[in-house]
Amino acid sequence: MEKIVECVPNFSEGRDRSIIDAIAGAVSGTDGVKLLDVDPGADFNRTVFTFVGGPEEVLEAAFRAAKVGMGLIDMRKHSGEHARMGALDVCPFIPIKGVTFEECTELAVRFGKRVWEELGVPGFLYARSARRPDRVRLPDIRKGEYEALEEKFSDPSFAPDFGEPVFVPRSGTFATGARPILIAYNVNLDTSDKSVASKIAGMIRTSGVVKKDADGNKIMGPDGKPERIPGYLKEVQAGGMMYNENIAQVSMNLLDYE
């Protein structure tokens, strides 16, 4: 195969095996695509699907998965440890062989448009495909998560890249775009205190933590935004969460291994 694209959609369902299998079936049933991995997490209530193939085939499989997932997952009933903003939370396209980031951005744009036009769910471009600096990082788009979407869509600055700024209670919204291979690295701690994991995550992630004064108030910069203390590592996102009710976890993503 001369051109290979990888797609790693994350869906907000990690407990109902019938829904997970239906999404997997939508991918594996697409000609020219190979489903490499299905990784569900019950506490996160999230499943990561990984598949590869030619650009057009991967694009078709991604849409079929989105259609099934958005048809079966109801965000009004969703709860889980992992941050999320929609039934299909994020759908990245990764160039593996003979494909550029620009070409993967074209796939993401076509994907986002089709999701809006056929499924009625608005979406955003992120990572290498972002059209604005404040949408490069997924956590910046996802701030406040699903529960904040209705209010955020009333703000003109939160206008989506695909579709109208409408809140779809059942499906929420999604992000898509081109990105490099991401390396996920999670460390389970010998504690059930999530704040310990969050403190460690703040020390190591690139964005660091917000500066605060002696009274615990945010210190604002000249631009009106909170000042931050940078973290130790470059190209790293990290957060503290609960792996299960007894184990706190530092969840990390290395965004660019090069």
Image (spheres, grey):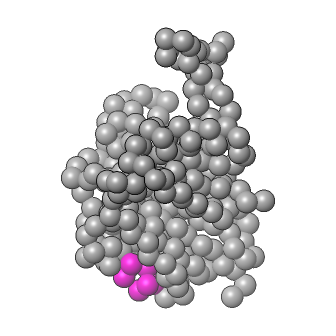
Determine which quarter of the picture holds residue 114. Answer: bottom left
Which of the pair 185/98 is nearer the observer?
185
- Residue located at (52% from left, 85% from top): 34
Query: Would residue 208 be found to the left or right of residue 76 on screen?
Result: right
Can residue 169 be seen at all in this image of the molecule? yes
Q: Is residue 255 magenta?
A: no
Quadrant location of the N terminus?
bottom right
On the image, the x and y values in percent for residue 177 come to 58, 56
On the image, the x and y values in percent for residue 169 come to 26, 47
- Residue located at (56% from left, 18% from top): 212
On the image, the x and y values in percent for residue 195 come to 44, 38
Can residue 164 be seen at all in this image of the molecule? no
On the image, the x and y values in percent for residue 244 come to 35, 57
Residue reaching furthest front?
A: 190
Q: Identify whether 176 is placed above or below 14.
A: above
- Residue located at (25% from left, 76% from top): 18
Name the chief secondary structure element in magenta.
Answer: helix
Residue reaching furthest left?
A: 77
Residue reaching furthest right?
A: 258
Query: Would residue 119 be found to the left or right of residue 6 on screen?
Result: left
Q: Is residue 28 magenta?
A: yes
- State which region is magenta: 24-30
Which of the pair 128/144 is nearer the observer?
144
Query: Would residue 138 be found to the left or right of residue 47 on screen?
Result: right
Quadrant location of the C terminus?
bottom right
- Residue located at (68% from left, 33% from top): 230
Determine which quarter of the picture holds residue 227. Answer: top right
